[in-house]
Amino acid sequence: MSSKAPQIKKRLILDTARRMLVERGSEDIILDDIAREAGVAKGTLFLHYRSKEELFGAVFADLVDQLGAELDRAAGSGLKEMRLLTETVRVILAHFDRYRDFTSRFAIERFPGCGERLHGRLMAHVARNRRAVVGILKRCSSDGLAEFKEIEFAAIVLFGFCRSAMLHKAVQGREGPLEARAPQVARMFLRGAGAAP
């Protein structure tokens, strides 16, 4: 068996669980259903995840970590000032758009199917992405783009602007990629954060 086979099966399980969470909600899913729809043996599913809660936690963590990897690439891109901020916004918007079926179903403080035991671990993944954005905003600030008075809060506001752009797209029924709005969202964020471009 290829060393990639377990990772491929794990990805298949996570993608199937995410889709089923959107379609059914966390209460109406049993692990047998996920294994069957993913085309894996139930034993394979239990090899990776011991419970439904652990699997759902992995689904959320996976999506948050994917965004974190994309933010790291933006931070290491060599871009500066407005180009770096716009790229950061584009990355967030593209991620939200790619997983809009899922991200629109939960708020940041609520992870369906995940109890208190996993909540803290999941919030640590979210906090890591916030720290990545704080680092990017610090770079933008040191490059002379803007001076953020409350940079931790500014990072949260940036995510909020991106979620608002996703909501606007849904309400307006707009076609096309959400990331095309990145320059506009970045400019609005700078004005809203009280920092002049």
Image (spheres, rainbow, N blue to C red):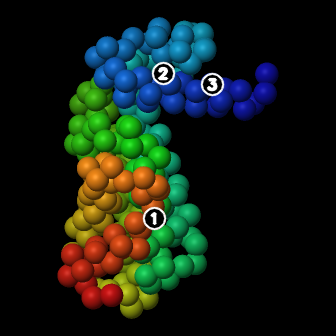
Residue shown at 31% from the left, 41% from the top: 104
Q: Secondary structure at mark 1?
A: helix
**Residue type at the position of mark 1:** Ala
Residue 184 visible in rendering: yes
Residue 184 on image: x %, y %: 36, 73
In this image, 118 relative to 61: left or right? left
- Report if residue 163 is visible in the image: no
Distance between mark 3 and mark 1 Cα atoms: 33 Å
| Residue under the image location 66 percent in, 26 percent down | 6
Counting residues from the start of the chain, the first of labels 2 and 3 encountered is 3
Residue mark closest to the camera, 3 vs 1: 1
Q: Position of residue 12 (x, y in %)?
A: 58, 27
**Residue to which mark 1 is pinned:** 180
Task: Return the residue at label 2.
Answer: 49
Check the image and report above or below for 152 versus 81: above
Q: Marks 2/3: CA distance?
A: 12 Å
In this figure, which residue is indicated by the disc labeled 3?
9
Identify whether 85 is placed above or below 99. Answer: below
Measure the alpha-carbon separation of dots 1 and 2. Answer: 37 Å
The quarter of the picture where residue 105 lies is top left
Q: Amino acid at mark 2?
A: Tyr
Image quadrant in which the N terminus is located: top right
Query: Can you tell which of label 2 and label 3 is closer to the viewer?
Result: 3
Residue 74 coordinates in the image, percent (x, y): 52, 67
